[in-house]
Image (cartoon, helix red, strand yellow):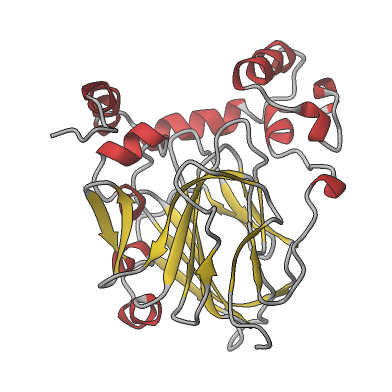
Amino acid sequence: MPDSKTSVVDYLKSLPLYVLPHHAISRLVYALTRVRSPLKNPFMRWFIHHFRVDMTEALESNPRAYASFNEFFTRAIRPELRPLAKAPEVVASPVDATVSQAAPIEAGRLIQAKGHDYSVLELLGGSDSLANEFAGGSFTTLYLSPRDYHRIHMPVDGTLRRMTYVPGRLFSVAPHTVRTIPRLFARNERVVTVFDTPLGAMAMVLVGAINVAAIETVWAGLVTPPHGRRISNSRYGEDRPAPYLRKGEEMGRFNMGSTVILLFADSGVNWSDDLVPGAAVRMGHEIGRGPAGE
């Protein structure tokens, strides 16, 4: 039954998503958002007005200067507006987002919403050793709305250890679907990145969603599309160089909005008291901290 925050309307809005051709729709969006035509300008004006996008924060504030809708959507932001929490023990927010959850990982499971949880094993692509590494750690789920800045940055210094592509559906990740669709983040297509950091092992999971027509990283470029049918793993530091990224550096981007799930292994990272469901966070601001001096 719906709880106090989940209405019948939420379920009715989510139900059609089960039968929609997620990937076909998203590939169409991929093509349309890259069209270079003056016809993009009226749509961009509507989008900015409808979602209340603050263009004064953009490095290029004139929407007409963007050659395509995707260039506008992945626009750079004025760096002085996102000061970086630089202390080495501080975890900086990787994105502009709304907090969905922030909690310990208990019994190998993460909270999705009231009445819904899912396993670390599922989320990270089925690796028992990797799931065990994070089983006693902590996580936060950060939702990027259409109005948000859509580049993803490093929350701490880190050396890339592995990247895993996990195929799946492309359910919407809007709040009403998070409340109603079981195991949503473990069912959607996603890119799992694992870093070794001064605060221990860290995973950033970039979760795809309907209309999220592409996920890319700075070291591998476009990871999806095309949509894969099998899990694929890339390991770094053995047969290929391991990228090292400093806190605040861009590590990837969504070409349309979605969700980032940030996990730390059991290394003593504690989330800030104000990192609660519904809170707004900005890239670079402190969201937690680990042991000082490590």
- Name the side, left or right, on which 214 lies relative to 77: left
Measured along the vertical axis of the image, is residue 159 above or below residue 104?
Answer: below
- Snapshot quadrant of residue 47: top right
As drawn, which residue projects farthest toward the front? 273
> Residue 108 placed where, x, y %?
28, 71
> Residue 208 placed where, x, y %?
46, 46
Q: Which residue is drawn at 86% across and 33% down?
A: 60
Residue 68 or residue 15, whichever sits in front: 15
> Residue 122 placed where, x, y %?
30, 64
Residue 95 or residue 37, whichever sits in front: 95
Asked whether residue 268 appears in the rendered view, the answer is: yes
> Residue 189 placed where, x, y %?
40, 51
Measured along the vertical axis of the image, is residue 87 above or below residue 257?
Answer: below
Quadrant containing the N terminus in the rendered view: top left
Q: Residue at x 18, y 33 (%)?
A: 2
- Snapshot quadrant of residue 150: top right
Residue 246 or residue 27, whichever sits in front: 246
Measured along the vertical axis of the image, is residue 179 above or below residue 103?
Answer: above
Q: Which residue is drawn at 40% across and 62% down?
A: 103
Asked whether residue 67 appears in the rendered view, the answer is: no
Q: Which residue is drawn at 27% across and 46% down?
A: 114
Q: Total number of numbered labels?
A: 0
Measured along the vertical axis of the image, is residue 34 above or below residue 214?
Answer: above
- Name the side, left or right, on which 79 lies relative to 42: right
Quadrant containing the C terminus in the rendered view: bottom right
- Snapshot quadrant of residue 118: bottom left
